[in-house]
Amino acid sequence: MSKTETAGGLTGDTTSLGVDTPVEKFREFLEIRGDKLTEPRRVLVRHIFNTHKHFDADELVRDLHDAGQTVSRSTVYRTLRLLVDSGLLRELRLTNRTAFEHDYGYPAHDHLHCTSCNRIVEFRNEQVKELRDAVSRAHGFRASGHRFLISGVCSACVRSHTPRRRLDLI
């Protein structure tokens, strides 16, 4: 799965909050739709929420295979869409791929995305929220959330892609 860094001590642990587990929430969502929580779907939800990582569908398929789980590629894709629709996962449309992350029981945050190595860095900044609220007020809008994604090149990629001149090596 993609490298993920968190700033500000973000954690995705919902057990200490006394709330339903992601599996229970997903079961409720599916029941409302007249659908069932099958064993492959249960395996997917548990696998996804076992750790906090940004991932795309192909990475999830590989991770499941490496963990000895047999879930079909089509089930992975369909279940990811349902998890987004249920509010358990958030979809991040990046420059060259679509990634997913936990949305349920995880504090609001924003992202930096390196378009060179695909690294995603999470950060929280109160000024971003304050700007969102000020812009919303100025337009008579009541904000309930936002998505802020900064695309660019991380410092490690800048260093590794900076051409070295012969004089620099002396």
Image (tube, grey):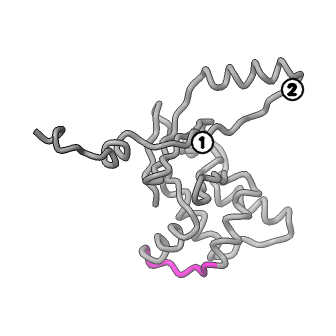
Name the magenta segment's main secondary structure: loop
Q: Position of residue 84 (x, y in %)?
A: 71, 57
Q: Position of residue 147 (x, y in %)?
A: 68, 39
Residue displayed at 86% across by 70% down: 34
Q: Mark 1 touching mark 2, by CB under 8 A? A: no
Q: Which residue is mark 1?
A: 106
Mark 1 packing: few (<14 Cα in 10 Å), some, or many (20+)?
A: some
**Is residue 96 depicted above or below 39 in this figure?**
above
Quarter that holds the C terminus: top left
Of the residues under marks 1 and 2, which one precedes in the sequence? 1
Identify which amino acid the numbered label 2 is placed on. Phe
**Is residue 98 depicted above or below 114 in this figure?**
below
Left/right placement of residue 149 relative to residue 67 reads right
Q: Is residue 84 magenta?
A: no
**Figure quadrant of residue 32:** bottom right
Residue displayed at 17% across by 44% down: 166
Identify which amino acid the numbered label 1 is placed on. Tyr
At numbered mark 1, what does the secondary structure look like: helix, strand or loop?
loop
Q: Which residue is mark 2?
A: 141
Q: Position of residue 46 (x, y in %)?
A: 56, 63
Q: Position of residue 48 (x, y in %)?
A: 55, 61
Camera-side residue: 168 or 159? 168
Farthest-out residue, right: 140
At numbered mark 2, what does the secondary structure look like: helix, strand or loop?
loop
Camera-side residue: 81 or 27? 81
